[in-house]
Image: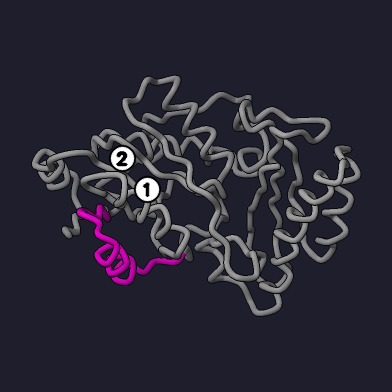
Amino acid sequence: MKIIDNIKELKNEIKNLKGSIGLVPTMGALHNGHKSLIDRAVNENDNVVVSIFVNPIQFGINEDLDKYPRQLNLDCELCQKAGVKIVFAPKVSEMYDDDKNNLTLICPPYSVVDKLCGKSRPGHFDGVCSVVAKLFNLTKANRAYFGQKDAQQLFIIQKMVKDLNFDIEIIPCPIVREADNLALSSRNKYLSENDRKLALTISQSLFNAKKMFQEGIKQKRAIIDACLKLMEQLDVEYIEFVDKNTFEFQDEANENTIILIAARVPETNTRLIDNINL
């Protein structure tokens, strides 16, 4: 496995690869959720590139850019054991000019970003799409692997690929959970012991919502009220129903519904997201 921190060397290595290329874009602090993406990519491609880059242009003011967990050595060990061919871990100066306010960005349609995480994090998805497009171009990947926990991000990237005719296949991968059903996230490292217990009410709410739907309850208000009751100790940013095919809001649940939640836990103010597909 090669660890590369500059674009010129990456391009040279990519030219020399034989066979298909799978890309797993990450911000590092790799956990078993990331490993599931990497393992699938290794199984389905001749070569796998994992990018490790904490992308500053997708963080807003007062977000956790400076404290976002960074553990490159451990991440590289995981990648090597998994059979990754290249880890691309560039510095910010390698990816962007000094004037990060004067960049050419890919801006998804207002209709898909002015809601949910995009509404509370203005410019976030511009930064995500722009860095992902750069990684697509640099790696010449045939396939790219993304987790379904970031459901809005996945939908937006799929739309970008379709609208801009990128010659790459996007592979959605299931949410990976810990034994107690907490969705794996790099930000789980922030949680205090009490916060972690409270964070479990997010997945509990989602699984209860699915149970209610299976029992014939489709009314949005009834399901949301049940979720809020379970999460009463959290600062809930949103609970929303969207159609998985269009990401448009829904007034009641059906077989195409994804229920999405974003909430903050009280002690560390850590923001967590999760979702369930009905």
Q: Which residues are magenta?
A: 69-89
134 left or right, relative to 149: left
Dot label at residue 36: none
The residue closer to the viewer here, 42 or 214, is 214
The reply to whether the C-beta atoms of the residues labelled 2 and 1 are less than 8 Å apart is yes
What x and y, as percent, mark residue 251? 83, 30
233 relative to 62, above or below = below
- Mark 1 lies on residue: 25
Does the magenta run of residues contain 202? no
Residue 142 drawn at (x, y percent): 29, 35
Counting residues from the start of the chain, the first of labels 2 and 1 encountered is 1
Residue, disc 2: 135
**Mark 1: few, some, or many residues within 10 Å (few <14, many ≥20)?**
many
Where residue 43 sits: x, y (%)? 31, 50
> Residue at the spot x=42%, y=57% of the render?
36
In-image side of 177 versus 33 (left or right): right
Q: Position of residue 205 (x, y in %)?
A: 77, 57
Residue 115 as seen in the image, left or right of residue 178: right
Q: What residue type is disc 2 on?
A: Leu
Residue at 80 percent across and 45 percent down: it is 214
Between the residue at mark 2 and the residue at mark 1, the CA separation in whole angstroms equals 8 Å
